[in-house]
Each structure stands twice: as C-alpha cells, then as structure tokens.
Image (cartoon, rainbow, N blue to C red):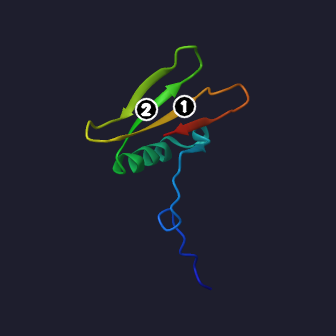
Amino acid sequence: MLQNQLSFESENLVVDYFEFKFDVLSEQTKQKIVQSFFKLGFNSFDVDKKYRDSIQTRIQTNYKNQHQIQFVANVSSYWNGVCVCK
C-alpha cells in the first residue's frame, strides 16, 4: 500500500489554532509537548483565564525564539480542557 505524501508544506497549509485536552495528560507528556515547541522556536506560557485579568506564567522561554504558544486554562464553563493558542 502506498503512503500518502501530503504535508503542510506541500499543500501550502498554515495552522492558526489547535487544541489539546492538556489537563488529562501526564506531566511527562506535557513537558515533551513544551520541549517540541521550544525546539521549533516557541516560547511557552500557561495562561489562566479564571479571573477577569488573565494570569500568565512562563513555562520555557528564550529571547531568540520568535513565536509564542499559550496553554490556556479555564477558557469557558463549557470547555473542560486547555486550549493551545499560537
């Protein structure tokens, strides 16, 4: 059977937004995700939107990184998870 050779680059696709159900992952898996994005040039932050003024906590950053990813908790009362925003 032939494997599909499609990729984001070959199809000129750009991802603006995606979500993880981050709260159900183990701490080790969370760290692997953070490390993977860090290697791609992303600074990572936890953001808690439980209160009117969001609280942002640095997970891993480097001044050379040009991108930012936020792991956002308490987005709404209808979503029990963490959104990942770029």
What's the residue at 31%, 42% (across, down)?
65
Q: In which quarter of the image is the N terminus?
A: bottom right
Q: Name the residue under label 2.
A: 45
Residue 24 spot, x, y in % from top left: 61, 40
**Closest to the observer, 45 or 24:** 45
What's the residue at 50%, 27% (across, down)?
47
Q: In the drawing, what numbered circle is on residue 72?
A: 1
Q: Outermost residue toward the front?
A: 12
Question: Please, what is the three-letter code of the amino acid marked with disc 2?
Answer: Phe
The mark that comes first in sequence, 2 or 1, is 2
* Pointers 2 and 1 in contact (C-beta within 8 Å): no
Left or right of 2: which side holds 80? Answer: right
Question: Please, what is the three-letter code of the amino acid marked with disc 1?
Answer: Val
SS class, disc 2: strand
Q: Outermost residue toward the bottom?
A: 1
39 versus 67 height, above or below: below
Q: In the drawing, what numbered circle is on residue 59?
A: none
